[in-house]
Structures are given as C-alpha cells and as structure tokens.
C-alpha cells in the first residue's frame, strides 16, 4: 500500500484548502457557473438528477481498513448511509451537499484519499488489476507504475483542460482484468529476454457513443520512458484532439480518423524530443514507489483442517468467490456486492466497516475494489476461508455468484444519473431474477447494463450488453452480444432494434438457454458465442421481440 | 486594457488598475448549487470567430500569419488552433508573445506555452489572454506564462492568492528523478506542514509552549518558531545532570534567535532526599530508583513549567522508539487536561538532519560524537551507527521501559 510522504500529503491538503475557497466564492456568487464547473468536476463533484454526487478515487483499487472506516463515517455524516462502487475503481456518494464537499474532502485527506481528477476533461483515476500482487498469473506488479502515473498526472498544469476525459489503465498479468482495451491509454507490462520491464502501449480504446478497441502504438517501451511517452501522447491529443464537438473529442476519434500508424508517428516525433529527458524515470523513482507495494509477509500455516464434508453452501462459495493466489495456501476472496434488492456496487456504512474489520482480521488490513463493482480481500489464508465465509454469511455478504449471471455490472442509471435515458438498476434486478434458476448451469457470463450511451457499465464489452435508450419518454433497451474486455477484447454486436424493458429478461433467458443447447463440453458462454457467431442468436432475438 | 498579473524577478505584481471597479451583483448559483439537473449536453462548440484582444501596450497584435510575413517586431497573438512550432527562429525580436484562450475548457494554449518555452527556447514575455481566470493562474504560470491578462470579471487579488497554492508539485524531478530530488521536495513539504501546524497551535491556544530537550528535533521547532515569530514560549528542564554541551544550547538560542529558553530545575529538597536515600547515582541500581530520579529531576519540573498552560509541544517522533510507533500529532494530555502536540511525529531522523542542514541550525555537539538520543549525562552513551536510537539511553535497562515519565502516560489520542 502506497504511503503518503510529506509531498503527497501537502498536495492533498493544499487541494482541500483551494477547493474550500473556490466553493465559498462560488456560493457567494463570485465564481460563475461556467468557471466553477471545471473546478468542481476536477474535485469529483457532479450535479446529478436529485442531488450532487461526489466521486472519490480509489487509486488502482487498493483500500485500507482505515479508509473503509472513513468512507463509512462519511456515508453516515454526509450521505444517506451508503456508498456506490463504480466500474473504474471509484466510490460515489450520491446525496452530498455542495457546501459540505470541502469538509468531506478534508475527512478523506486524513486517510490519504482524495477526489482529485475523478471527473472533468483531464487524466482520470488510474486503474489496474484488482488482484495485483496476489494473482498467480502476474508477470509484473502494475501498482508502482500506476502510482508513478498517478503522481505525474495529478494537477499536471498542461493537461488539465484536455478535449475530453482521459482514462489510463495498466495490466501486468497474463489475463487482462483491467479492461485495458477500452481505455484512452493503456499499458501491458511484460519482461523482455533480459528481464527488463517493458510496456506495450495501447491508445484510443473507449466505449460510449463511439466504442473502439484500443490500437497498439508501441510494443517495447522501456519502463523508464513511461512518463515521457505518456506526455507525448497527451501533448499530441491536447494539441490536435477535436474541440468543436464533444461527441468527437475523445482520443479514440482522433486515432480512428488519423489511423493508428499516423497517430503513433505523431507521438514518436514528440517523444523523440522528450526521451532521456527530465521526466525519464530513474531507478530511484521506481524503487521509492515499489517499496510500498511489498505485500505483507504471508505466514505459512497448516492446510485446512475442517471436515471433508463441507457444507454445500461453503463449497459453492469457495469455488466461485475464492480466487487462486500466487501462494497456494492463500486465496483472494471476492465479496459480492450483487445482492437481491440492492443496486449493484452499493454498500452500506455498516457493511463498509464490517469489510474493514474483516480486512484487519483476514487480509492484513487491505481490501480491493474490482471494476466488476465487488470488493476483494486479497490475501486470505485458505485455512481461514470457512471462518470468513461464516462471518460474511451472517451479514448476507456470502453470495456465491462471482462471474455468474447475477454478478451484473450496472451503472446508477435513471434512478440517479441526470444523463441516463433509462433505469438500469430495476432491469438488472429483473434479469438476475429471471436467470436465477439456471445461473449455476450457465457458469461464467458477464452481463452489463448501462442506462445510456455513455456506457458506464461497459455494455459494449459485456458478453451480453444492455443499453438504455429513450423512446417517447419510455425506457427502451438495445441488446448486444459477444463483447469481452479481457484478452482478445471485442465489442458486442447489436442484436436488433430496441425493445421495451419488460421484454429484456426473456430475451436474455432465451439466449442463455440457446447457449446451453449449443455448447460443447465445458465451453463457456462467450467461447460458444465466438464459435457459432452472433448471427446464430439474431433469429432468436427477432422471435423473442415478436413474442414480446 | 485589462488588468494584468505579471510575474517579475521580484515576484508577482498587478499592472493596470481597472478603470471602473466591477459593479456586479453576485449571481448566486441556482438552487444553492444543487440545481441544473437534467441540463442537456450541447455537443457542438462553436469556435470563436475573432481574437479576444486587438491590442497590446505597444500597438496591434499580429496574427500568426501576419507575424510570419512581417519583420518579427512587436507582439504576436496565437490562436488555439495555431501551431506554435512554426515560430521557431522567428521570435528573437519579439516584444511579446500572447496566447488567446477563447474558453476556460480549451487547453491548447497550455501546450503552446510548453512548446514556446521548452522547444523554441523563447524566454521573453509570454501572455495569456481571453478567458483567463484567477483559478487558472497557477497552472498558467507553471507552464511558462509570466503575464496574465485577466478576464474583466476576475479579481487580481484572487489571482495573486491562487499563485501561493501548491508550493510543491509532482511533475519533473520530484516524481521521475533520483532520491535526492524527492528528498528535497519532501523537506520543503515537511517544513511547510510544520510551519502550518505551529501557526495553528499559536492561534488556537492562549499560552502554548515548546518543551525543548535541546535535541535537534526541538531545535528544528525553535528555528521555525523564531523564523515565523510565533508567540510560543520555549522552556527546557535542567535536571542538574545534563552534559555541558547540551546546556550550551541555551545561550546559543539566545544569541542566534534572540529567544529566551526558560530553564526549570528540580526542587533542591527532593534532590537532597534522593541523594540521601539512594546515592547520587542510585538510578543504576534498578528501574524503580531510576524512575524516581527521573520523576524528581524531570517530571516534577515539567509540571511547574506547564502550570497555567493550555497546550504543550514536544519533539517526539514515531521512529524514535517502539513506544512511540503509534504517536499522534495531536493528543489529549489526560493528566493535565491540556492538549499535547507532536508536530514532528511523522518525521524521520534524516528529515531532522536535512532540515538542520538546509537552515543551518545549531545542534548539540554530542551528535558528532555518536550520541543520538540525548538525556542526562550519566544515563546516556553514544551508540554504534545502525543501533536502535534509544539504545544509548538507560542502556543497562530492558528496551521496553525506556521512557522517563514525561511521555509515559500514553495520553489518549484527541
């Protein structure tokens, strides 16, 4: 866990003081609405449908128990007693008051948290694999590189007013769990033949109105040039990105219209003047940051002793929610925040404190947030799993549904968001209920429900994606099939015209059952779809649409 | 001509008073700022059709095209869509380069400034104009602007104040560079946080005092108190058994800073009773005898020194001893019912040494002879480099009990 030094602490404190003064001036009428907007956005404050929303960064998804307790205290004192985890390793408070935001930011600063650049046209919170440092397939621990990127991009004077938002992600494992292909700028970390860390650089991925899989523009970047190369990318984007139409302002549009090669050439031209310059990283810089990400010494313990006849509930939970750890006697445990009757990603203050206590008891005080909107205890001794399961069960947090149909990724939607066309949360609940009888049989499947074209729930890269559109004041939905966000990322294909909300669960149920008929052996849903092609499902969609 | 904030070698200053001070009725935000929900996004942004300014102090601005065709004298005004790089080699006689910001959100001008300063080596005056607000002043100056023509409704005072924020920044050597660069930034940040903590203490309390053991930590705070001229008293406890090198710092503080360090001594009667019962060096005989000596020579005088005070400050640090690992920066002294501050709690010994080096503060001569944590002469010895810093204190005792009683009550965190 990165520990703030005085530089980090001072910068966050200064930011709080600066924003406190700006808020005061705004409320007194001395800063107008237009001038205040970028200030509040870059401090995480949106004006939502019912109330302002504050988005707080959880850099690279790492949360300490002290931070969980602080989030709980904030949820109680300034919100309605709960918080919402997003798909980009942020946490949102949906009911804050504009005038109280500086106080919330001061509270966050006490535990080294902030809301800097969680919104606005700037470099956003850097994300990565929620299992970093624990996953058995990790090649390079991405967290030190994320932290260097976080520091460098924080309050960068040249890049605070980009054409649009700019999202950065890192992956250092064999399986990409950071959805890097749909980021503006992303890095795959690997080791060359000499063991030196290098980066594959991808640019121009994104979702929203113009979904696009990122293009590789560099394959062998030395790690020391991480910041110089990023600077070159951002400078090219800042100077030439479109500003006449916000729908065409993301870097993906620029990469698409120029072509990835031409964009890469532009970046290389600029980079040639920056490499080996003052922003080239030193061994000292990496070592300074890396020393914070040495994982706790994991004591060896006896193998699990419990009786061989495990209760079936525990067995199912363990199979679904306890993920392999680089140490065979440990596991990373996913705590599902996808519960019946509760919006995906929501956690109450009591639950945040409870998870903090579990982190202290089972995982060296550390938890993680995944982009699937679940919480993770990264380092749990396998012999303690039963105990942890029992503790979670008492609070209704032991749902064994990780990567199953009910582990739906969902945005706040029309219930909260002022941009949304449709309500995504009730639909997610309906889909989840409809598939419940077959979800064990179905196995791994990712269903993503977005309330609008902005794609906060990543519907383009869900195995099944659902997108809310508005027709004549009513909620309608489009269904997409065949997307994925991991290795071999691909955008889902549209199945047909939009349908009414009540038709969607039936359509998805029919698609799931068709998969069960067609699958070969242990073939997963997405593997089956890729084998038979999405067209095999289109006719089915048309039938269902008619029936509805 | 609008009001211009200029960065000069002597610091920022304001040029050109506003002719008519703005008579603005504050447009308080709708619904207290909680409003504007469901405001639809307007995707198309119309580019401005004309420059935000026509003239500078010396005449008309040339557009980029005019400048490239002209004699290279006067001032050129770059538009957001221009490519600043075409000015390479064409600015040697320029009196002014200005960059037009049509909207706050259009950040191309920042890249213009970067290129002008870093790629073209332009060192002359560089002005931002158009939609230039006080809240952008800091970022603008950080990318190289030294002249900010503020938008008409902007207050130059707020712009000047904004320039004071963020005395340290992440970009450049502090993140990418070697350890020395980060250490340097870190020391600046530590110093500033310390100064703020001391200022806050002096504002929140009537009679705060620094309990100085004359150790380097206390000299750091003495230096900061003196530099900021803060109304914080300084006292020390002369146990009667201190090294002469330690006591030499009392007149040194007076000479160097003009500050009096008030000296409190133990009661003669209590000392005499101790000597009669246990001998002058009776503390070597056992922890009880040692603690009694500490109680008489240190804890009792501390009580006198804190009489009537509402806060005290110590130089304790977390990494000094296992007993201090969880030290808070602000504690409640339960026994006395006052606040106790440990502003250096997060500091490491290298931070203290770095501060001592940067500000050239007087420190105890014993440090040079291998002493680290310095108490009374008979109870302190030099330690080997790398040893526990407190191992030279009461070295004949077990590690766990190494507190004299001044800080032993583990006051609850406030």
Image (cartoon, coloured by chain):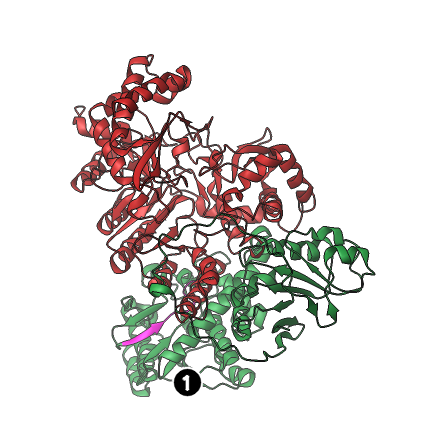
Chain colours: A red, B green
Q: Find numbered disc 1 in the image and state the secondary structure of the residue it sits on.
A: strand
User: Which residue is depicted at the point 49% across and 78% down?
Assistant: B23
Q: Residue furthest right?
A: B71
Q: Position of residue B356 (x, y in %)?
A: 55, 70
**Is residue A282 at least partly visible in the picture?**
no
Q: In the rendered view of the protein, which quadrant contains the C terminus of chain B?
A: bottom left
Membership of B345 in magenta stretch = yes
- Given residues A153 and A6, the one toward you in this image is A153
The relative height of residue B41 versus residue B212 in the rendered view (above or below) is: above
User: Which residue is depicted at the point 50% across and 32% down?
Assistant: A213
Quarter occupied by residue A332 = top left
Total numbered badges shown on the rendered structure = 1
Q: In the rendered view of the protein, which quadrant contains the N terminus of chain B?
A: bottom right
The relative height of residue A180 versus residue B171 in the rendered view (above or below) is: above
Relative placement, left or right, of A179 versus A85 is right
Badge 1, how many Cα within 10 Å: few under 14, some, many 20+?
some
Membership of A104 in magenta stretch = no
Quarter occupied by residue A54 = bottom left
Relative placement, left or right, of A449 versus B179 is left
Q: Position of residue B70 (x, y in %)?
A: 81, 59
Which span of residues is magenta-colored?
Answer: B338-346
Q: Residue furthest front?
A: A472
Chain of the residue where label 1 is placed in the rendered structure: B
The relative height of residue B117 versus residue A28 in the rendered view (above or below) is: above
- Given residues B269 and A209, the one toward you in this image is A209
Residue matched to label 1: B263
Relative placement, left or right, of B202 versus B228 is left
Q: Position of residue B190 (x, y in %)?
A: 49, 65
- Given residues A350 and B78, the one toward you in this image is B78
User: Which residue is depicted at the point 65% across and 35% down?
Assistant: A262
User: Which residue is depicted at the point 23% across and 47% down?
Assistant: A351
Relative placement, left or right, of B408 versus B100 is left
């Amino acid at each position: 866990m990165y520990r703030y030094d005085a530089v980090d602490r001072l910068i966050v404190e200064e930011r709080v003081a600066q924003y406190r003064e700006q808020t005061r001036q705004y409320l007194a009428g001395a800063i107008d609405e237009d001038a205040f907007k970028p200030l509040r956005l870059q401090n995480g404050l949106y004006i939502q449908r019912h109330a302002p929303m504050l988005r707080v960064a959880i850099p690279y998804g790492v949360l300490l128990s002290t931070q969980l307790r602080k989030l709980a205290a904030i949820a109680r004192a300034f919100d309605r007693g709960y918080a919402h985890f997003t798909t980009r390793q942020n946490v949102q408070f949906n009911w804050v008051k504009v005038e109280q935001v500086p106080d919330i930011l001061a509270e966050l600063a006490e535990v080294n948290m902030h809301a800097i650049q969680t919104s606005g046209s700037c470099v956003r919170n850097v994300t990565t694999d929620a299992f970093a440092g624990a996953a058995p397939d990790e090649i390079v621990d991405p967290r030190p590189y994320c932290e260097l990127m976080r520091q460098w991009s924080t309050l960068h004077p040249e890049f605070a007013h980009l054409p649009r938002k700019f999202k950065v992600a890192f992956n250092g494992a064999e399986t990409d769990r950071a959805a890097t292909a749909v980021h503006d700028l992303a890095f795959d970390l690997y080791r060359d033949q000499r063991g030196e860390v290098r980066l594959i650089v991808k640019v121009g991925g994104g979702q929203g109105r113009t979904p696009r899989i990122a293009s590789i523009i560099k394959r062998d970047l030395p790690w020391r040039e991480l910041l110089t190369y990023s600077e070159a990318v951002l400078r090219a984007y800042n100077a030439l990105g479109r500003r006449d139409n916000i729908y065409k302002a993301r870097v993906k549009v620029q990469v698409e219209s120029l072509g990835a090669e031409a964009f890469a050439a532009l970046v290389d031209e600029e980079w040639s003047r920056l490499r080996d310059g003052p922003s080239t990283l030193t061994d000292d810089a990496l070592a300074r940051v890396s020393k914070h990400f040495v994982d706790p010494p994991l004591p060896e313990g006896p193998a699990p002793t419990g009786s061989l006849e495990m209760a079936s509930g525990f067995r199912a939970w363990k199979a679904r929610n306890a993920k392999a750890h680089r140490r065979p006697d440990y596991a990373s445990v996913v705590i599902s925040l996808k519960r019946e009757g509760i919006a995906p990603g929501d956690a109450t203050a009591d639950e945040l404190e409870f998870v903090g206590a579990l982190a202290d008891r089972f995982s060296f005080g550390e938890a993680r947030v995944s982009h699937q909107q679940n919480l993770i205890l990264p380092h749990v001794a396998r012999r303690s799993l039963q105990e942890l399961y029992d503790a979670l069960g008492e609070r209704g947090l032991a749902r064994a549904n990780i990567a199953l149909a009910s582990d739906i990724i969902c945005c706040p939607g029309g219930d909260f968001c002022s941009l949304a066309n449709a309500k995504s949360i009730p639909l997610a609940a309906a889909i989840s209920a409809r598939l419940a009888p077959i979800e064990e049989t179905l196995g791994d499947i990712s269903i993503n429900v977005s309330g609008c074209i902005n794609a906060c729930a990543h519907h383009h890269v869900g195995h099944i994606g659902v997108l809310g559109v508005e027709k004549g004041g009513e909620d309608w939905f489009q269904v997409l099939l065949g997307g994925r966000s991991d290795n071999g990322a691909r955008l889902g294909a549209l199945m047909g015209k939009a349908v009414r909300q009540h038709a969607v669960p039936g359509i998805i149920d029919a698609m799931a059952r068709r998969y069960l008929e067609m699958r070969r052996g242990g073939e997963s849903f997405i593997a089956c779809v890729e084998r038979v092609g999405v067209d095999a499902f289109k006719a089915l969609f048309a039938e269902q649409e008619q029936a509805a | 001509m609008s009001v211009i904030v200029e960065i000069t070698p002597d610091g920022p200053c304001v040029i050109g008073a506003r002719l008519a001070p703005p008579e603005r009725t504050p447009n308080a935000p709708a619904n207290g700022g909680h409003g504007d929900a469901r405001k639809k996004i307007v995707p198309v942004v119309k580019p401005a059709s004309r420059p935000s300014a026509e003239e500078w102090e010396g005449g008309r601005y040339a557009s980029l095209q005019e400048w490239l065709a002209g004699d290279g004298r006067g001032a050129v005004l770059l538009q957001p869509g221009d490519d600043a790089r075409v000015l390479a080699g064409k600015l040697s006689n320029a009196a002014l380069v200005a960059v037009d910001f049509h909207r706050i959100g259009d950040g191309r001008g920042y890249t213009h400034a970067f290129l002008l300063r870093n790629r073209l080596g332009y060192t002359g005056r560089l002005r931002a104009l158009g939609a230039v607000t006080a809240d952008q002043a800091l970022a603008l100056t950080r990318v190289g602007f030294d002249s900010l023509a503020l938008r008409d409704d902007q207050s130059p005072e707020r712009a000047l104040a904004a320039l004071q924020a963020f005395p340290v920044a992440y970009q450049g050597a502090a993140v990418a560079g070697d350890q020395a660069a980060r250490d340097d930034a870190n020391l600046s940040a530590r110093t500033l946080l310390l100064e703020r903590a001391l200022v806050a203490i002096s504002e929140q309390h009537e009679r705060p005092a620094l309990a100085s053991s004359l150790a380097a930590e206390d000299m750091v705070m003495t230096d900061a108190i003196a530099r900021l001229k803060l109304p914080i008293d300084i006292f020390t406890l002369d146990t009667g058994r201190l090294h002469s090198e330690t006591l030499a710092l009392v007149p040194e503080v007076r000479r160097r800073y003009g500050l009096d360090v008030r000296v409190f001594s133990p009661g003669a009667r209590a000392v005499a009773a101790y000597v009669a019962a246990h001998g002058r060096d009776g503390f070597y005989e056992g922890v009880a005898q040692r603690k009694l000596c500490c109680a008489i020579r240190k804890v009792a005088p501390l009580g006198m020194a804190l009489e009537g005070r509402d806060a005290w400050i110590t130089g304790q640090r977390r990494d000094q001893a296992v007993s201090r690992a969880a030290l808070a920066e602000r504690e409640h002294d339960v026994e006395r019912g006052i606040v106790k501050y440990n502003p250096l709690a997060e500091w490491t010994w290298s931070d203290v040494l770095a501060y001592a080096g940067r500000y050239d503060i007087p420190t105890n001569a014993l440090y040079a002879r291998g002493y680290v944590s310095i108490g009374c002469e008979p109870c302190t010895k030099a330690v080997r480099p790398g040893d526990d810093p407190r191992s030279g204190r009461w070295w004949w005792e077990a590690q766990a009990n190494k507190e004299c009683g001044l800080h032993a009550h583990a006051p609850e965190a406030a």
